[in-house]
């Protein structure tokens, strides 16, 4: 495609062919598969437009940089991890360094907010901006979090906007709520555990996505059945009978049970009805209870989330993480 | 944007305004927030191009259909769930029904494969196709699964391709591996449990994403620390000492422990080094052990995955799910 767009002809790059061939043989050996599984792709992967500069390989996938009259074209593999790896190499090449030296990338500031509506953020922005209607601002809502990107001149609005939205501002830049939770635990030497029902491991999965989570996170229980809520978390049978598995009382018992049984200082629990089935008039689909216990105090919240099963689960997990964050911040 | 592209002027739709206003008030009440948080957006949301037909609301987000000279333009909200909801409504409208009556959508067949390389699939396709090089075939690799989409005329290749790739074909269409696992358990009245270390809840999370998982899935343990592997899963201390937490022996003990402690018929476990830290020359980052126990037999596998923490975790979870699927299919 790059060759066609640039009007260049295609050729097999011999050095690249040798390289891809070697990687393919190594992969074949490692996977204990015959090399012939990989052979047909090798020549194709080593083909590039005349004048193209190889960026090396991500696995067996090549990247190529091509200088055109007034532009530089970079072709990268599609899978994000491979793209990112070879893009880093492209940035190091002389043509791109030369290009970047002539430009200054716009400043980017991101504020991460929780517990505030999109329209309230828009209003705060209008006020911070003196009604000038900044163009280079993106407000993106996602599972009750709102991320505000301030680009270029708009970056100057950051201090004013941050101060107007201070109660909701939990992080800046790329820092996620699970990172904030782990950092706060780590700073105080606290260990963490989870007890999940309707989120089915989503909270634990988000926490363990963070490298180094293991020095804070001891583990979690996914107690989908009522028996497991009793056996693994010590939730009393009469509590389940009286209030039902989806209740504030059971959420609290799950959190304290996780703390005690898993030997942690801090625990968070989620129980709810993610749907599409299982709702009742008293407890509709979307009803979720989230409970957090910390050495400083504990709290249980009731939510009625809208959306499909996936959205309800994601929002429940986000709300659980933010509850722990808040409990660990108040002191 | 739609108004600008079509050359129509904008107007506030009064009926839509009333509708959005009502929804906004209901949301404000439900969220216990002042209505003024929502008010500024209401009028803007109710503005549509002259001649546009409202598709109703997803939350407070409207959709609009506009008939142009030779085309129909449909503008939908960006969030996928909202888009999908209103797209379903758009399909029911008279203009779109009229358009669809004149067309026949191309047939689409999807084969879902596991344990085969992309290039082996490409070769099987060439053979099935008699070398005719079908244009309407997409081969998409993702975490060791390969999805082959056959569109239009290429759909006729399905039986031949499926027979050539039979050992790797685990499902067709939109069916995921977690659905296959749950279905196989359900058909035989078997219950299921998980024990995870490096995947941190990812396997449980994938299983519980499926509506109705609760009639098969009892729960899971995320045993990140060695103490929890002993306390919650009964993994023997001397096993941990002798083989290390990342070993086939511990993976097997985690699976049998999960089966016994969680009272399930089938259990699957994962333990490994997701990185970026924690690797050694003997056990490098990417080393993962996966173990499955079923009434028919059990198996433990060793993997060396490539990629970053996220890729290693995803691949480990996929491999665990496919191990259980295979163990439940062999009988």
Image (cartoon, coloured by chain):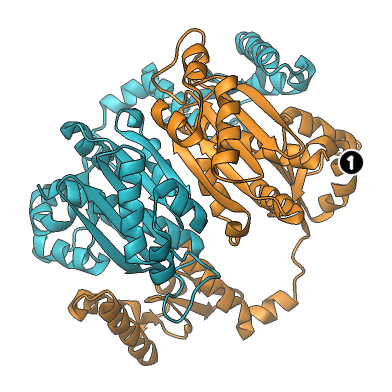
Chain colours: A orange, B cyan
Looking at the rendered structure, the secondary structure element under dot 1 is helix
Is residue B293 shown above or below A289? Answer: below
Q: Which residue is at the front of the view, B247 or A140? A: B247
Which quadrant of the view contains residue A228?
top left
Please indicate, yes or no, whether residue A53 appears anywhere in the rendered image. yes
Quarter placement of the C terminus of chain A? top right
What chain does badge 1 belong to? A
Classify A13 as above or below B51: below
Residue B109 point in image, percent of width and height = 21, 44
Asked if residue A119 lies left or right of residue B126, the reply is right
B321 over A83 or under it: above or below: above
Instruction: Identify the residue position indicated by label 1 in the image.
Output: A163
Q: Is residue B283 left or right of residue A132?
A: left
> Visible in this render: residue B139?
no
Q: Residue at x 80, y 56 (%)?
A: A152
Q: B94 and B314: which one is in front?
A: B314
Q: Residue B130: x and y, percent? A: 8, 64
């Amino acid at each position: 495609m790059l060759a066609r767009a640039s009007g260049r002809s295609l050729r097999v790059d011999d050095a690249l062919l040798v390289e891809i061939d070697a990687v393919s043989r190594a992969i074949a050996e490692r996977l204990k598969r015959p090399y012939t599984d990989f052979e047909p792709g090798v020549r194709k992967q080593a083909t590039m437009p005349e004048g193209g500069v190889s960026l090396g390989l991500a696995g067996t996938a090549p990247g190529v940089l091509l200088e055109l009259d007034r532009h530089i074209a970079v072709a990268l593999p599609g899978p994000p991890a491979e793209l990112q790896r070879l893009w880093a190499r492209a940035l190091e090449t002389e043509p791109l360094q030369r290009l970047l030296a002539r430009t200054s990338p716009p400043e980017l500031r991101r504020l991460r907010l929780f517990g505030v509506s999109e329209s309230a953020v828009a209003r705060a922005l209008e006020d911070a901006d003196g009604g000038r209607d900044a163009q280079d601002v993106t407000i993106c809502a996602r599972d009750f979090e709102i991320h505000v990107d301030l680009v270029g001149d708009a970056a100057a609005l950051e201090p004013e906007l941050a101060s107007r939205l201070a109660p909701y501002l939990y992080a800046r830049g790329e820092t996620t709520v699970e990172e904030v939770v782990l950092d706060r635990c780590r700073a105080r030497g606290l260990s963490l555990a989870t007890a999940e029902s309707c989120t089915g491991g989503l909270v634990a999965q988000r926490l363990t996505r963070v490298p180094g989570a293991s020095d804070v996170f001891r583990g979690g229980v996914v107690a989908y059945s009522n028996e497991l809520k009793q056996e693994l978390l010590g939730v009393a049978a009469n509590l389940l009978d009286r209030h039902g598995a989806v209740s504030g009382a059971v959420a609290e018992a799950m959190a304290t049970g996780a703390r005690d049984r898993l030997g942690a200082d801090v625990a968070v629990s989620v129980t709810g009805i993610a749907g599409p089935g299982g709702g009742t008039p008293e407890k509709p689909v979307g009803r979720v209870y989230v409970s957090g216990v910390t050495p400083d105090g504990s709290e249980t919240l009731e939510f009625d989330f809208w959306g499909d099963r996936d959205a309800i689960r994601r929002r429940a997990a986000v709300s659980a993480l933010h509850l722990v964050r808040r409990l660990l911040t108040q002191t």
